[in-house]
Amino acid sequence: MSDYSQLYDAIVNGDHRLAAEVTKSALEANTDPSELIAKYMIPAMNEVGNRFACNEYFVPELLIAARAMKASLELLTPLLAAGGVQRVGRVVIGTVKGDLHDIGKNLVASMLEGAGFEVIDLGVDVPPDKFVDTAREKEGTIVAMSALLTTTMVNMKAVVDRLQSAGLRDKVRVMVGGAPLTPQFAEQIGADGYSENATEAVALARRLVSEFATTA
Ligand code: B1M
């Protein structure tokens, strides 16, 4: 792959026009969208996070970096989602209550779509009942929750508990992810699986769907 480090710089510097421009050139050169995301874009957002953590960046810089990331992702995610394959399962995805971070969740949603899943995206700041009510509409649904804050990841447990009290826990599977989570946390709250990134999330969703097939 050619060097697209300009894309990294555009995101770190919050230049959404340049981010879109470099992304377009990369796509014209047939660059793999997943490689652009993994090699330049996620590292750029991590750098933005590091600068925020050491008080070099503040919320406005996070916002403009996120806008640049989204300008690029807008061009890339239709390609990730263009699987054109037969539906393999249904996923209800959202960022949990209190949490507004949606870039990682959107990536996971696009990759799942590209892998053939029907994806219902509930957005951000999703109350527990919204996950439960949407999962209730169809048996065999995967509930997929994202959280980026240590203060909001705890809200995932409320969803698992409500699925239980609604008598749905055996009819759905629950998967969780997001930077502050660990496999141990997922186990503690009674989720069926944790994945570290969007590629692993697809593998996990496939595994969870195959469990439905074997328990049906
Ligand atoms: Co926020 N923020 N932020 N922020 N922000 C973090 C998360 C933080 C780590 C920054 C830092 O301190 N270094 C920190 C959290 C600290 C903590 O809790 N431990 C933080 C903070 C503190 C805050 C505020 C509280 C700041 C404030 O107001 N003082 C505030 C909270 C707002 C709220 O949500 N209530 C806040 C606000 C924001 C913005 C709105 C400005 C903006 C978000 C814009 C948006 O999403 N639309 C923002 C941003 C951009 C970040 C950082 C810099 C980047 C996040 C990102 O998009 N990463 C972030 C620092 C960092 O992550 N290094 C930070 C790129 C994305 C592709 O990765 O989301 O991790 P990620 O997703 C990955 C994996 O985690 C995984 O796969 C994805 C792809 O590989 N994954 C899943 C995610 N969900 C998954 C679900 C799955 C499976 C895998 O299955 C269901």
Image (spheres, helix red, strand yellow):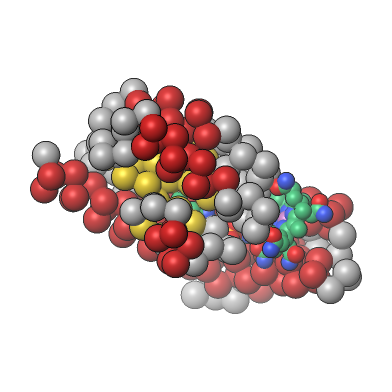
Residue 169 falls in which quadrant of the image? top left
- Does residue 56 sit above or below 130 in this rendering? below
Q: Is residue 55 visible?
A: yes
Kindly give the residue lying farthest to the front in the view shown.
Answer: 165
Please state if 211 lies on the left or on the right of 173 as rendered. left
Q: Is residue 137 rendered to the left or right of residue 69?
A: left
On screen, residue 156 versus residue 12, left or right, reads left
Q: Is residue 136 left or right of residue 68?
A: left
Note whether residue 75 is visible.
Answer: no
Q: Residue at x 66, y 45 (%)?
A: 99
Residue 180: horizontal and vertical position, in percent? 59, 63
Q: Which residue shows up at 58% across the image and 35% down it? A: 126
Quarter placement of the C terminus: top left
Residue 84 vertical position relative to residue 107 in the rendered view, above or below:
above
Say which quarter of the image contains residue 184. bottom left
- Which residue is rendered at x = 45% and y = 54% of the image? 189
Is 22 drawn above or below residue 93 in the view shown? below
- Expressed as whole percent of the image width and height from the top left, the position of residue 21 reads 68, 55
Disc tally is 0
Ligand 1 picture quarter: bottom right
| Front residue of this view, candidates 69 and 52 | 52
- Percent position of residue 86, x then y: 22, 39
Instruction: Give the image location of residue 35, x and y in percent.
Output: 48, 67
